[in-house]
Image: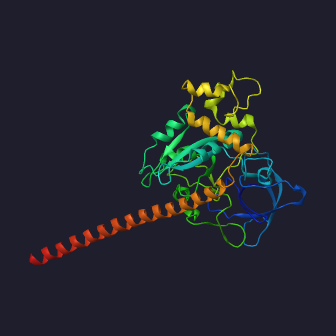
Amino acid sequence: MDALVITVDRGRYGCVREEAPPDSPVITAMRARELGRKSVVVGDRVALVGDVTGAPGALARIVRIGERTSVLRRTADDDDTTPEGRLERVVVANADQLVIVSALSDPPPRTGFIDRCLVAAYDADIEPLLCLTKADLAGPEEILGYYAELDLPYVAIHPGSDLTELRKRLAGNISVMVGHSGVGKSTLVNRLVPDALRAVGVVSAVGKGRHTSTSAVALRLPAVGKSRKDPGWIIDTPGIRSFGLAHVSAESLLHGFPDLVEGTLEDQPNCGHTAADVGCRLDAWVAEGKADPRRLESYRRLLASRAGDTDPRESEREAERADEADRRESDYEAERANEADRRESESAGEAESMGGEAEEDSAIG
């Protein structure tokens, strides 16, 4: 039987038939020995044998992994001379789209992270989609201006959005969702798939239901109305706070900045395009107004990071910023919840007041 891997947990793989009804049981499987060291990741299409009923305690075997149409990779570090940089991880397989979730405010957009995601997406031949949250707090003009030359597809949403435009872009695709802590990604996933149970963590469909917050999970999007169109799948990737790019070649890194590529066509042979390369054509390209200077700065930062020319304390600052973002998201969601409760209380009070006036009028009559 052919199936899609939707969870991976300690050697056990949760699988479902893509054409099966949404309420079909998850089939727990293990990898057959004949597969050797070949990894199985979320998004893989596999062949199962054995007990495929999905009943409690049942265990199937994965005997074949289908050819992957795309592979999204990352490393823990940018420098391939370090142990972390050499440790390449496959995030997901067979994705069509990378949804980069970024808040427009609180926290403000982090273009460095977005640029990394774009490089990873282009390297994997996956279409990027920028999803801008908290549009009630700020407009998208500044961030869109930064990416103006890329014609990057985007959607802007706020707590009251009906998500129609986003659902249209997700329909028929397997979309990977990535985003820093604090941008509202978990809230968005829960709105897209109300049964996802990911407000704090995901209850694993594999094993004994332990809570995890770092494993990828594929979620089938619910059908909208009477439409027969495939609503698609989203793959949530909690715990990914950075995209190391040690696995990406220097050439692929440049193609992650398509607005700069043309500026290198007349460059000197063997130019490294760094700030230290005297006469690099990119400096003139930016000076002529053909690209945003911030884009060149970002590109060169990634080049420097690949060369190991980074501040070792930056990872500590990154973790501190992520923790602060977590706190802000909690405060933001709590504020929204309190506002909703306050409105509900006011509505209830008005209804009670109107009811009392009606009783008084009745008594007078």
Q: Quadrant of the N terminus?
A: bottom right
Q: Locate residue 282: give its quadrant.
A: top right
The relative height of residue 31 versus residue 57 in the rendered view (above or below) is above
- Whole-percent x and y of residue 105? 47, 51
- Whole-percent x and y of residue 365? 9, 75
Horizontal side of residue 37 vs 244, given as left or right: right
Residue found 60% across the figure and 45% down from its top = 112
Horizontal side of residue 226 vs 349, given as left or right: right
The relative height of residue 211 versus residue 320 in the rendered view (above or below) is below
Q: Is residue 69 visible to the viewer in this orientation of the structure? A: no
Closer to the camera, 101 or 94? 101
The relative height of residue 306 versus residue 34 in the rendered view (above or below) is above
Residue found 62% across the figure and 62% down from its top = 23
The relative height of residue 119 versus residue 345 in the rendered view (above or below) is above
Residue found 50% across the figure and 60% down from its top = 329
Coloring basis for residues: rainbow
